[in-house]
Amino acid sequence: MSVRTQLELNLKSVEDRIGAACARANRMRADVTLVAVTKSVGAEVAGMLFDLGVRDFGESRPQSLWAKAATLPPTVRWHQIGHLQRNKLERTLPLVALTHSVDNLRLLDSIDKWSEKQQRRSDVLLEFNMSREEEKTGFALTELPAIIERLTTLRSTCVRGLMTMAALADDPEQSRPAFAELRVLRDRLRTVVPDPHSFQHLSMGMTQDFEIAIAEGATLVRIGSALFEGVP
Ligand SMILES: *Cc1c(COP(=O)(O)O)cnc(C)c1O
């Protein structure tokens, strides 16, 4: 089977599963965006996925995002989904539609300062460590008061929602409590944080658990392995 045919089958299968999960949850398919996570493949394979109609692409390492953004068509919406070091934000922010992984207040401040200087607006999500694993990045719930206070001081950065990664597990149901908790947190922040922040997004769910994430309200699912299975 050609790489293109394999990709087409994988994409169809992922699309069918997203569609079925939306139907079960009484949600519109249009309310969930598939973000194709291309960290395990090269720009050529990512380009084939673009040709198959995918427009939202995610990378966890900024350097990989820069490289692929230089070769894929400019109509791609890029998502920075992994940890962003402050010294990489100047090269990354101009390329991305959304940064999912703001995991500390210093980074948030730096993004805001840079954006103001450039006279542009940056859209971000706040990453929370809902699985409470020590090695994971993301804010802890104990940081909430400081976060809420800081959000009111931002001038050029809009928080569009929250992101989390569940713990690795064999049973996708194990991710459900973390996803449900993130949704409750998002709903609460939506009522207490003023405009221009909007909190419409929940970025949660990967190959192991995206159907559960959709059931719990995900608006962005970040999927890699299921799209690239069998692709060299
Ligand atoms: C790699 C990665 C994904 C995709 O994971 P798969 O299991 O390959 O679907 C999603 N989110 C983040 C932050 C990642 O680093």
Image (cartoon, rainbow, N blue to C red):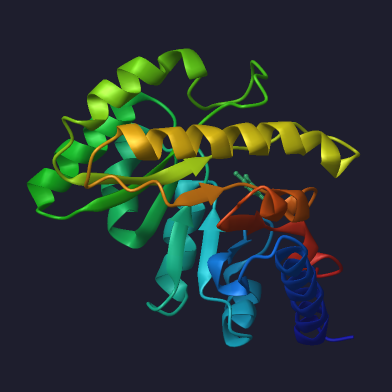
From where the camera sits, is residue 206 visible? no
Q: Is residue 90 left or right of residue 141?
A: left
Please give the name of the residue rendered at 56% of the width and 57% of the height, measured from the top-left corner.
220
Please give the name of the residue rendered at 62% of the width and 27% of the height, measured from the top-left corner.
130
From where the camera sits, is residue 143 visible? yes
Q: Position of residue 76 (x, y in %)?
A: 44, 73
Q: Is residue 137 left or right of residue 193?
A: right
Give residue 66's quadrant in the image. bottom left
Give residue 135's quadrant in the image. top right
Depth check, front residue: 32 or 24: 24
Please tell me whether residue 167 is drawn above or below residue 140 in the rendered image: below
Q: Quadrant of the C terminus?
A: bottom right
Depth check, front residue: 155 or 103: 155
Please give the name of the residue rendered at 57% of the width and 80% of the height, measured from the top-left corner.
50
Q: Position of residue 134 (x, y in %)?
A: 64, 15
Q: Is residue 109 left or right of residue 49?
A: left
Please give the name of the residue rendered at 27% of the width and 46% of the height, measured from the top-left corner.
158
Q: Quadrant of the N terminus?
A: bottom right
Please tell me whether residue 125 is drawn above or below residue 184 in the rendered image: below
